[in-house]
Amino acid sequence: MTISVIIPSYNGSSTIRQCLTSLLSQQRPADEIIVVDSSDDETPGIINSEFPQVRLIRRQQRTSCGMARNIGVDNSSGDIVAFTDTDCIAAPDWLARLEEAYEIFDCQCAVGGVGGPGEESWIAALDRAISFSEQLASGPTRWLKGGIGGGLNLSFRREIYLELGGCADWKYGEDVPLIAEFRRRYGQVLFVPSARVLHISPNDIGKVLAHQYRAGPGFAYARLYNPALAGSLAVRHTCLAPLLPIVKGSRVLVRLLKYDRALLATVLAHFPTFVRALWLWTAGMLAGVREVGEAGGPNE
Protein backbone atom coordinates (compact mmCIF):
# COMPACT_ATOMS: atom_id res chain seq x y z
CA MET A 1 0.00 0.00 0.00
CA THR A 2 1.37 3.41 -0.97
CA ILE A 3 0.25 6.76 0.47
CA SER A 4 0.31 10.19 -1.15
CA VAL A 5 -0.07 13.20 1.16
CA ILE A 6 -1.70 16.22 -0.49
CA ILE A 7 -1.75 19.74 0.95
CA PRO A 8 -3.68 22.69 -0.52
CA SER A 9 -1.74 25.86 0.20
CA TYR A 10 -2.47 29.57 0.18
CA ASN A 11 -0.30 32.01 2.13
CA GLY A 12 0.76 29.46 4.72
CA SER A 13 4.30 30.73 5.24
CA SER A 14 3.90 31.07 9.03
CA THR A 15 3.12 27.37 9.52
CA ILE A 16 4.33 25.49 6.42
CA ARG A 17 7.69 24.60 8.00
CA GLN A 18 6.04 22.91 10.98
CA CYS A 19 3.63 21.07 8.71
CA LEU A 20 6.22 19.71 6.28
CA THR A 21 8.75 18.90 9.00
CA SER A 22 6.14 16.75 10.73
CA LEU A 23 5.32 14.96 7.47
CA LEU A 24 8.97 14.24 6.74
CA SER A 25 9.39 12.81 10.27
CA GLN A 26 6.68 10.15 10.05
CA GLN A 27 7.29 6.68 11.50
CA ARG A 28 5.72 5.38 8.31
CA PRO A 29 7.10 7.73 5.63
CA ALA A 30 4.80 9.12 2.96
CA ASP A 31 5.51 7.73 -0.49
CA GLU A 32 5.10 11.25 -1.83
CA ILE A 33 4.14 14.68 -0.48
CA ILE A 34 2.45 17.07 -2.89
CA VAL A 35 1.74 20.75 -2.12
CA VAL A 36 -0.61 22.56 -4.51
CA ASP A 37 0.17 26.20 -3.86
CA SER A 38 -1.34 29.45 -5.13
CA SER A 39 0.22 31.79 -2.55
CA ASP A 40 1.34 35.34 -3.07
CA ASP A 41 3.64 35.20 -0.03
CA GLU A 42 6.97 33.39 0.47
CA THR A 43 5.46 29.89 0.87
CA PRO A 44 6.67 28.49 -2.50
CA GLY A 45 10.18 29.83 -1.86
CA ILE A 46 10.28 28.11 1.54
CA ILE A 47 9.22 24.81 -0.01
CA ASN A 48 11.69 25.00 -2.89
CA SER A 49 14.67 25.99 -0.76
CA GLU A 50 14.08 24.03 2.45
CA PHE A 51 12.01 21.00 1.43
CA PRO A 52 13.36 19.64 -1.88
CA GLN A 53 11.79 16.23 -1.11
CA VAL A 54 8.33 17.79 -1.46
CA ARG A 55 6.69 18.08 -4.86
CA LEU A 56 5.39 21.60 -5.42
CA ILE A 57 2.66 22.24 -7.97
CA ARG A 58 2.52 25.99 -8.47
CA ARG A 59 -0.67 27.80 -9.47
CA GLN A 60 -0.45 31.41 -10.61
CA GLN A 61 -4.03 32.31 -9.68
CA ARG A 62 -5.59 31.65 -6.30
CA THR A 63 -7.04 28.15 -6.25
CA SER A 64 -9.76 26.90 -3.91
CA CYS A 65 -8.92 24.18 -1.39
CA GLY A 66 -11.22 21.78 -3.22
CA MET A 67 -9.65 22.36 -6.63
CA ALA A 68 -6.15 22.17 -5.11
CA ARG A 69 -6.97 18.78 -3.60
CA ASN A 70 -8.31 17.56 -6.93
CA ILE A 71 -5.17 18.72 -8.75
CA GLY A 72 -3.05 16.98 -6.15
CA VAL A 73 -4.91 13.71 -6.55
CA ASP A 74 -4.71 13.90 -10.35
CA ASN A 75 -0.93 14.20 -10.03
CA SER A 76 -0.53 11.55 -7.32
CA SER A 77 0.32 7.87 -7.56
CA GLY A 78 -0.54 6.46 -4.12
CA ASP A 79 -3.14 3.81 -3.37
CA ILE A 80 -4.32 6.10 -0.56
CA VAL A 81 -4.58 9.89 -0.78
CA ALA A 82 -4.34 11.59 2.62
CA PHE A 83 -5.15 15.29 3.00
CA THR A 84 -4.04 17.81 5.56
CA ASP A 85 -3.58 21.60 5.65
CA THR A 86 -0.64 23.96 6.01
CA ASP A 87 -1.77 24.95 9.53
CA CYS A 88 -1.58 21.37 10.80
CA ILE A 89 1.19 19.33 12.42
CA ALA A 90 0.92 15.58 11.83
CA ALA A 91 1.56 13.34 14.84
CA PRO A 92 4.59 11.06 14.23
CA ASP A 93 2.35 8.00 13.82
CA TRP A 94 -0.33 9.70 11.68
CA LEU A 95 0.31 7.73 8.49
CA ALA A 96 1.08 4.51 10.36
CA ARG A 97 -2.32 4.69 12.08
CA LEU A 98 -4.10 5.45 8.81
CA GLU A 99 -2.38 2.58 7.00
CA GLU A 100 -3.24 0.21 9.84
CA ALA A 101 -6.90 1.25 9.67
CA TYR A 102 -7.12 0.61 5.93
CA GLU A 103 -5.52 -2.82 6.35
CA ILE A 104 -7.61 -3.95 9.32
CA PHE A 105 -11.01 -2.51 8.37
CA ASP A 106 -10.63 -2.60 4.57
CA CYS A 107 -12.29 0.83 4.48
CA GLN A 108 -12.63 3.16 1.52
CA CYS A 109 -12.50 6.45 3.43
CA ALA A 110 -11.01 7.30 6.82
CA VAL A 111 -11.17 10.49 8.88
CA GLY A 112 -8.56 11.15 11.56
CA GLY A 113 -8.62 13.00 14.86
CA VAL A 114 -7.81 16.67 15.44
CA GLY A 115 -5.93 17.82 18.52
CA GLY A 116 -4.08 20.93 19.58
CA PRO A 117 -0.36 21.58 20.09
CA GLY A 118 0.93 21.44 23.66
CA GLU A 119 1.35 25.21 23.94
CA GLU A 120 -2.23 25.90 22.84
CA SER A 121 -3.92 28.89 24.49
CA TRP A 122 -7.51 28.88 25.70
CA ILE A 123 -8.41 31.05 22.70
CA ALA A 124 -7.05 28.49 20.24
CA ALA A 125 -8.63 25.64 22.21
CA LEU A 126 -12.02 27.35 22.02
CA ASP A 127 -11.71 27.71 18.25
CA ARG A 128 -10.75 24.05 17.92
CA ALA A 129 -13.66 22.92 20.11
CA ILE A 130 -16.19 24.73 17.93
CA SER A 131 -14.61 23.85 14.59
CA PHE A 132 -13.53 20.25 15.11
CA SER A 133 -15.63 18.70 17.88
CA GLU A 134 -16.70 15.99 15.42
CA GLN A 135 -13.04 14.91 15.18
CA LEU A 136 -11.85 14.90 18.78
CA ALA A 137 -8.64 12.90 19.01
CA SER A 138 -9.90 10.49 21.65
CA GLY A 139 -12.17 7.48 21.91
CA PRO A 140 -12.11 4.24 19.93
CA THR A 141 -11.88 3.73 16.19
CA ARG A 142 -15.48 3.61 15.00
CA TRP A 143 -17.77 3.94 12.00
CA LEU A 144 -19.43 7.35 11.74
CA LYS A 145 -23.20 7.20 11.41
CA GLY A 146 -23.43 10.98 11.22
CA GLY A 147 -21.25 14.04 11.41
CA ILE A 148 -18.82 15.26 8.82
CA GLY A 149 -15.07 14.94 8.91
CA GLY A 150 -12.97 17.89 7.78
CA GLY A 151 -10.44 18.04 4.97
CA LEU A 152 -7.57 18.80 7.35
CA ASN A 153 -7.43 15.07 8.24
CA LEU A 154 -9.22 13.09 5.57
CA SER A 155 -8.19 10.17 3.37
CA PHE A 156 -9.60 8.00 0.58
CA ARG A 157 -8.58 5.15 -1.61
CA ARG A 158 -7.47 7.08 -4.66
CA GLU A 159 -9.78 5.32 -7.13
CA ILE A 160 -12.78 6.03 -4.89
CA TYR A 161 -11.92 9.74 -4.67
CA LEU A 162 -11.68 9.93 -8.46
CA GLU A 163 -14.91 7.97 -8.91
CA LEU A 164 -16.74 10.41 -6.62
CA GLY A 165 -15.49 13.36 -8.68
CA GLY A 166 -13.41 14.93 -5.92
CA CYS A 167 -14.10 18.06 -3.90
CA ALA A 168 -16.35 20.88 -5.02
CA ASP A 169 -14.66 24.01 -6.38
CA TRP A 170 -16.28 26.19 -3.72
CA LYS A 171 -15.02 28.99 -1.50
CA TYR A 172 -16.24 27.16 1.60
CA GLY A 173 -17.32 23.69 2.71
CA GLU A 174 -15.78 22.00 -0.33
CA ASP A 175 -15.35 18.62 1.37
CA VAL A 176 -18.95 18.32 2.64
CA PRO A 177 -20.63 17.22 -0.63
CA LEU A 178 -17.78 14.78 -1.26
CA ILE A 179 -18.30 12.99 2.04
CA ALA A 180 -22.09 13.13 1.65
CA GLU A 181 -21.82 11.47 -1.77
CA PHE A 182 -19.45 8.87 -0.36
CA ARG A 183 -21.98 8.01 2.34
CA ARG A 184 -24.77 7.77 -0.22
CA ARG A 185 -22.82 5.30 -2.33
CA TYR A 186 -20.72 3.38 0.20
CA GLY A 187 -22.19 3.90 3.67
CA GLN A 188 -20.33 4.87 6.81
CA VAL A 189 -16.95 6.58 7.08
CA LEU A 190 -14.30 5.11 9.39
CA PHE A 191 -13.18 7.48 12.16
CA VAL A 192 -9.66 6.86 13.48
CA PRO A 193 -9.08 9.31 16.38
CA SER A 194 -5.54 8.02 16.98
CA ALA A 195 -4.50 9.15 13.47
CA ARG A 196 -4.03 12.70 14.73
CA VAL A 197 -3.10 16.04 13.28
CA LEU A 198 -2.64 19.04 15.56
CA HIS A 199 -4.38 22.16 14.33
CA ILE A 200 -2.61 25.48 14.86
CA SER A 201 -5.56 27.74 15.71
CA PRO A 202 -5.07 31.52 16.09
CA ASN A 203 -4.26 32.92 19.54
CA ASP A 204 -6.00 36.22 18.87
CA ILE A 205 -9.65 36.41 19.89
CA GLY A 206 -10.48 38.71 16.99
CA LYS A 207 -9.02 36.20 14.52
CA VAL A 208 -10.92 33.34 16.15
CA LEU A 209 -14.22 35.19 15.90
CA ALA A 210 -13.46 36.10 12.27
CA HIS A 211 -12.61 32.44 11.59
CA GLN A 212 -15.97 31.33 12.96
CA TYR A 213 -17.76 33.92 10.83
CA ARG A 214 -15.94 32.62 7.73
CA ALA A 215 -16.83 29.04 8.62
CA GLY A 216 -20.57 29.76 8.59
CA PRO A 217 -20.95 30.07 4.79
CA GLY A 218 -19.59 26.53 4.29
CA PHE A 219 -22.51 25.18 6.32
CA ALA A 220 -24.94 27.14 4.14
CA TYR A 221 -23.29 26.27 0.81
CA ALA A 222 -23.38 22.54 1.42
CA ARG A 223 -27.00 22.47 2.55
CA LEU A 224 -28.34 24.69 -0.19
CA TYR A 225 -26.89 22.25 -2.71
CA ASN A 226 -27.69 19.07 -0.78
CA PRO A 227 -30.98 19.44 1.15
CA ALA A 228 -30.57 15.93 2.60
CA LEU A 229 -27.88 17.19 5.00
CA ALA A 230 -28.81 17.85 8.62
CA GLY A 231 -29.53 21.52 9.24
CA SER A 232 -30.91 22.20 5.77
CA LEU A 233 -34.28 23.32 7.11
CA ALA A 234 -32.75 26.25 9.00
CA VAL A 235 -30.71 27.24 5.94
CA ARG A 236 -33.71 27.20 3.62
CA HIS A 237 -36.01 28.85 6.17
CA THR A 238 -33.75 31.42 7.78
CA CYS A 239 -36.38 32.40 10.35
CA LEU A 240 -35.18 29.24 12.13
CA ALA A 241 -31.55 30.43 12.15
CA PRO A 242 -31.67 31.57 15.81
CA LEU A 243 -32.00 27.91 16.75
CA LEU A 244 -28.69 26.98 15.11
CA PRO A 245 -26.34 28.33 17.82
CA ILE A 246 -28.34 26.42 20.43
CA VAL A 247 -28.27 23.18 18.45
CA LYS A 248 -24.63 23.47 17.40
CA GLY A 249 -23.48 24.56 20.86
CA SER A 250 -25.34 21.72 22.56
CA ARG A 251 -23.80 19.16 20.24
CA VAL A 252 -20.32 20.54 20.85
CA LEU A 253 -20.79 20.36 24.62
CA VAL A 254 -22.13 16.80 24.49
CA ARG A 255 -19.17 15.62 22.41
CA LEU A 256 -16.73 17.31 24.77
CA LEU A 257 -18.46 15.76 27.79
CA LYS A 258 -18.09 12.33 26.22
CA TYR A 259 -14.60 12.54 24.76
CA ASP A 260 -12.61 15.52 26.10
CA ARG A 261 -13.56 16.89 29.52
CA ALA A 262 -10.44 19.02 29.79
CA LEU A 263 -11.46 20.88 26.65
CA LEU A 264 -15.02 21.07 28.00
CA ALA A 265 -13.70 22.80 31.13
CA THR A 266 -11.91 25.35 28.95
CA VAL A 267 -15.09 26.08 26.98
CA LEU A 268 -17.19 26.46 30.14
CA ALA A 269 -14.60 28.78 31.69
CA HIS A 270 -15.01 31.09 28.70
CA PHE A 271 -18.66 30.41 27.94
CA PRO A 272 -19.65 33.98 26.92
CA THR A 273 -16.96 33.96 24.22
CA PHE A 274 -18.13 30.50 23.12
CA VAL A 275 -21.69 31.82 22.70
CA ARG A 276 -20.46 34.90 20.84
CA ALA A 277 -18.48 32.72 18.43
CA LEU A 278 -21.55 30.58 17.74
CA TRP A 279 -23.63 33.65 16.93
CA LEU A 280 -20.95 34.91 14.55
CA TRP A 281 -20.87 31.48 12.91
CA THR A 282 -24.64 31.78 12.43
CA ALA A 283 -24.23 35.29 10.98
CA GLY A 284 -21.68 33.84 8.55
CA MET A 285 -24.15 31.14 7.60
CA LEU A 286 -26.78 33.77 6.79
CA ALA A 287 -24.21 35.70 4.75
CA GLY A 288 -23.54 32.50 2.81
CA VAL A 289 -27.24 32.08 2.06
CA ARG A 290 -27.38 35.64 0.72
CA GLU A 291 -24.21 35.18 -1.32
CA VAL A 292 -25.50 32.04 -3.02
CA GLY A 293 -28.83 33.74 -3.74
CA GLU A 294 -27.16 36.80 -5.26
CA ALA A 295 -24.51 34.95 -7.26
CA GLY A 296 -26.64 32.05 -8.43
CA GLY A 297 -24.15 29.44 -7.25
CA PRO A 298 -21.10 28.83 -5.05
CA ASN A 299 -18.62 29.15 -7.91
CA GLU A 300 -19.63 32.66 -8.91
Image (cartoon, rainbow, N blue to C red):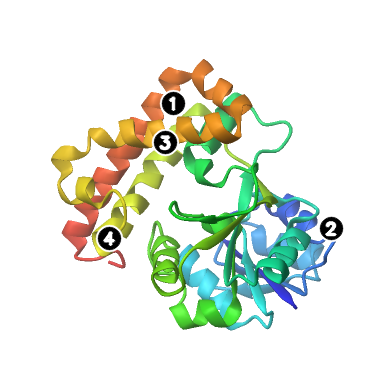
**The residue tagged with tag 1: helix, strand or loop?**
helix
Q: Which residue is mark 1?
A: 274
**The residue tagged with tag 4: helix, strand or loop?**
loop
Q: Which residue is mark 4?
A: 228
Question: Callout 2, which amino acid?
Answer: Ser
Task: Tell me, for residue 25, which label it has, or none.
Answer: 2
Closest to the observer, 168 or 144: 144
**Mark 3 or mark 4: whose residue is earlier in sequence:** 4
Question: Callout 4, which amino acid?
Answer: Ala
Residue 233 image point, x, y percent: 20, 49
**Mark 1 or mark 3: whose residue is earlier in sequence:** 3
Q: Is residue 236 left or right of residue 115?
A: left
**Mark 2 or mark 1: whose residue is earlier in sequence:** 2
User: Which residue is depicted at the point 40% across and 57% down?
Assistant: 173
Quadrant of the rendered image containing residue 105:
bottom right
Report crowding for label 2: few under 14, some 14 to 19, many 20 or more residues within 10 A (C-alpha): some
Depth check, mark 4 against mark 2: the one in front is 4
Position of 75 relative to 7 (above/below): below
Question: Callout 3, which amino acid?
Answer: Arg
| Mark 4 vs mark 2, CA separation in Å | 41 Å
Circles 2 and 3, Cβ within 8 Å, touching? The answer is no
**Mark 2 or mark 3: whose residue is earlier in sequence:** 2
Depth check, mark 1 against mark 4: the one in front is 4
Residue 91 image point, x, y percent: 75, 50
User: Which residue is depicted at the point 68% across and 83% down?
Assistant: 77
Question: Callout 1, which amino acid?
Answer: Phe
Instruction: Tally the marks.
Output: 4
Q: Which residue is mark 3?
A: 251
**The residue tagged with tag 2: helix, strand or loop?**
loop
